[in-house]
Image (cartoon, coloured by chain):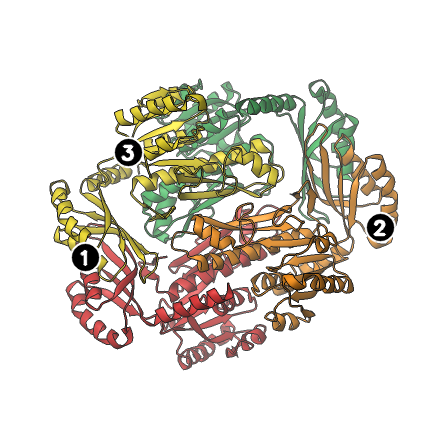
Chain colours: A red, B green, C yellow, D orange
Amino acid sequence: METEVKVKLEKHNKQLENRGRLLVKCPDKPGIVSVLSTFLHNYDSNIIESSQYSSDPENGTFFIRIEYHCDHLAEKSANMEKDFEEIATTHSMDYEFAYPNERKRSAIFVSKEPHCLMELLWEWQNGDLDTDIVVVISNHEDARPFVEALGIPYYYIPANKDIRKQVEAEQIRLMEEYKVDLLILARYMQILTPDFVRHFENRIINIHHSFLPAFIGAGPYERAFERGVKLIGATSHYVTNNLDEGPIIEQDVERVNHRDDVTDLKKIGRKIERRVLAKAVKWHLENRIIVQDNKTIVFH
Amino acid sequence: METEVKVKLEKHNKQLENRGRLLVKCPDKPGIVSVLSTFLHNYDSNIIESSQYSSDPENGTFFIRIEYHCDHLAEKSANMEKDFEEIATTHSMDYEFAYPNERKRSAIFVSKEPHCLMELLWEWQNGDLDTDIVVVISNHEDARPFVEALGIPYYYIPANKDIRKQVEAEQIRLMEEYKVDLLILARYMQILTPDFVRHFENRIINIHHSFLPAFIGAGPYERAFERGVKLIGATSHYVTNNLDEGPIIEQDVERVNHRDDVTDLKKIGRKIERRVLAKAVKWHLENRIIVQDNKTIVFH
Amino acid sequence: METEVKVKLEKHNKQLENRGRLLVKCPDKPGIVSVLSTFLHNYDSNIIESSQYSSDPENGTFFIRIEYHCDHLAEKSANMEKDFEEIATTHSMDYEFAYPNERKRSAIFVSKEPHCLMELLWEWQNGDLDTDIVVVISNHEDARPFVEALGIPYYYIPANKDIRKQVEAEQIRLMEEYKVDLLILARYMQILTPDFVRHFENRIINIHHSFLPAFIGAGPYERAFERGVKLIGATSHYVTNNLDEGPIIEQDVERVNHRDDVTDLKKIGRKIERRVLAKAVKWHLENRIIVQDNKTIVFH
Amino acid sequence: METEVKVKLEKHNKQLENRGRLLVKCPDKPGIVSVLSTFLHNYDSNIIESSQYSSDPENGTFFIRIEYHCDHLAEKSANMEKDFEEIATTHSMDYEFAYPNERKRSAIFVSKEPHCLMELLWEWQNGDLDTDIVVVISNHEDARPFVEALGIPYYYIPANKDIRKQVEAEQIRLMEEYKVDLLILARYMQILTPDFVRHFENRIINIHHSFLPAFIGAGPYERAFERGVKLIGATSHYVTNNLDEGPIIEQDVERVNHRDDVTDLKKIGRKIERRVLAKAVKWHLENRIIVQDNKTIVFH
């Protein structure tokens, strides 16, 4: 079995070498798929996966994510991208080419509770997150041992609202030093300023410990207990300047009952948080998410 | 198989004849279970099912629901209830004796959308709701045919906010005429006045078409769509004078995605609404719900 | 809201008039999507939805379902289909053109338990099943009243294993008389012979009252109870000559516990059965299912 | 928050000191609850939680689990247990007294895949498993580093069917040396002999990587893929001498589709396996499980 998995993984990594992704957003009209697929075919690319969505077949916006295989892609991609410019102009396309073997570089911010961080590290060790985790930053020392044990640099930066400005300056410096593409807030319990968020638009993923928009803000489990809900949830979303109001990527819930006190809700909630955050991160890394009008289109 | 079910049902109905339920709420202290079980044993009752909950073992409130079998219960119950008064006084108990073969009388209010009404009628025909549905009231004529086909009286009472007072007077009159114990709002889209609600404290069950406290008030599916949530829900609750803020009985959710427009959300939502309301009604009829501090204890 | 829904529905029906679906299965190689999308574009068709799957990017089989809009489709479709033949030959394609406004004709077979039948009728009345239910056949009289109330012909054909041959002859005659495209076994408790099944390959959908392959055959709830499982399930599948072994379309489960006896399992199971069957029927009617090697590819 | 949790935990541990559990199984008849609750009350015990089940109110078997608080329990328990003997004899009771502060001693057996082991260690570090994990035994070296990092002894015992007898002798010796109460098979991929199992009746918990009784035996994910199921599952159960046929404790499932190959099924399956095993272990440690006729009664 073990061997089968390894052979499979090697095959998978080999395939990634010649794998490309094209994401397009443009005004909907007949012929777009034809244009795109013919373009790819002209470069001997084989479409492996294709997902599309139109907000409205008449006068709507069209979105498509194509994953393709192309032999010798590394040698061809610059030309392909250049050639595509004319198509994009003609059809008023916003677009992005992505190459899964150019792994995104992720940073994780965490406070005291390590469960979300641990889940991400675990998925990453399993080969289920196609990213390099290049740095972990925390306002506590707790998680240092098992982060450093994996060879990942760990920075302890104490934080509170009085020193927010200098803390964020230091964090941004590290983000730049480590060339971070994606910032994951794995239960990082400090508010980020608009200035910080502006540096990483649609590149910060947060986990909020409630089923948004219920219980926006602080103390969601305490308030869920107070309200007597029968399900609790968690929400992963991109961070914007409106607290807990950014585009939702994924949500899930678990059943609770009158016997569960706030401590129980937190325990149950941790299981939801970790899986909901891991899914969002995975989809982001696989270029499966398009943000539109404070909502997400997720092609999974 | 059919025969097996019938024999089973007859056996079940026969058992109900001598079946009693005792619900108690009192300050928690050692010996309460002993007092109650000894009391029942002295009347040759056999405890069939017992569920309890203590808000806090030290100085908390104790809740218990006991279902018991007692031969010749009809002849004994008056004496039992009288004898129990002293126990209740000694231990500062709030309590209720209920007898499942004295079926509760239910009224259903409905507007245009019939799915919740249909589900309740369906469960009722299956013998899964131990109640007599004695009257259906609607501000539309749509549901009349299939309600009357089941031999249930149907009243059409047009309603809007200008005539609310006289409408409610007529509704209350009908509730009294039909000796209604439980009022089920099966997607009845009119607001009830505090005066009306006061007549039926903890006896009106509503279905709200969102996962409360998200999307309180009107247009929850429209607002869920707008927010881009990845799950939608429904909530059954007792009606109080605070709109959509009464004690929650049951909630459930279904997964949605970016392809689902408002019409799709409503379709998916109907499936959640009907099952969430049916569960709440069933538990109420089986005396499984205790309301405490705007929350519910549900022994199921 | 009501008005909005109607406007939406009319718009939807209008759109269906010019809506086509193309399903293709062929050896995978680069350029297939380009060929198909260019073909459709040449007929001024706009691709509304497209889903594809490749069993293996190298030397695998490629499957695609395209839904497109095309003005004046009715006038063009014959030519389109003719023109497509050459493409199909070139690329060794199995394919099917379908037109949603040519509604499929469905027959429902039912025995005593009506819950699956009722759910289908309910979805159909809501406009959620794009089919004409042209006939209901049963070996019991129970369901006649509410089927005929909807204007659907109802045939009572007593059945048992001794008269199977003549029963099936009569059933096949009716299927032909009513030009039935899809046969739905909504808890029809008689075994069908290979001869009967051969008439309707991949056009008979059954609901089995277990989570297949657990509890193949008779008495699944009794056996689930005996085994002490903690979840029970239901499975919708195409009928083949191997009992309960046909391609699975959809499955779902519900939680049960030690308190649930066989009667309880059946009650809980009915809720699973009706939703699992309704989903399978809906997907079939929308041409979302491709059968391959006794498995299904479901594009939903 | 942190402080709140700690205070809560200390309070919880303090409560455990004087916490007892009484599990009883006996022929059902009126008065049992009265006898038990009066017995406990006579020792000034307060019933915290009580769950009961009767297989059949007439001539059935009665099961009850009572959790109680009793000041100075350690000094009283020997007397209580002695006094209880007469009651037990009178009512033909099988029974067990358990004291949560006498933590059970657990051993974990694991092979190559560490996810179930990791989940158990994680829950244990969180204080969610009331046990001492006293030893881990594996037929591989892989898990040694993170087990020993937690201060838990790790034994590498190579195993295959040719040396089974001596391997099991060594394992039994270690079980005795470490005074193991519970043996958890966290994806231990070796078959145990009847002789081994006999040593630990109803004290070995296994996780099987399928929704039993579907896919009993080897290669369940391969066979699930082959059959084309739409859900995959996992099952935790007590080990008996009939492979994969012991009393089921817990089961759960996840949705899969035609895109998921065997490797995907295994990845998804791991998430199910780890949570299903952790629940079973937790319930066992809390004395919530009674085995009866190859089924489990789980009071949770």
Horizontal and vertical percent for residue C48? 23, 50
Under mark 3, the amino acid is: Asp
- Of residues D71 and B16, the one nearer the viewer is B16
Under mark 2, the amino acid is: Ser
Give the residue at mark 1: C35
Image side of residue A284 versus residue C36, left or right: right
Residue C53, located in which quarter of the rendered image? Answer: bottom left
10 Å neighbourhood of mark 2: few (<14), some, or many (≥20)? Answer: some
SS category of the residue bearing label 2: helix
**Furthest residue in direction front, as rendered:** D162
Q: Quadrant of the N terminus of chain C?
A: top left
Q: Is residue D241 visible?
A: yes
Give the residue at mark 3: C181
Both on one chain, marks 3 and 1? yes
Q: How many marks?
A: 3
- Of residues A169 and B37, the one nearer the viewer is B37
Q: CA distance from mark 3 to mark 1?
A: 30 Å
Horizontal and vertical percent for residue A248? 39, 58
**Where residue D77 is drawn, which disc sits there?**
2
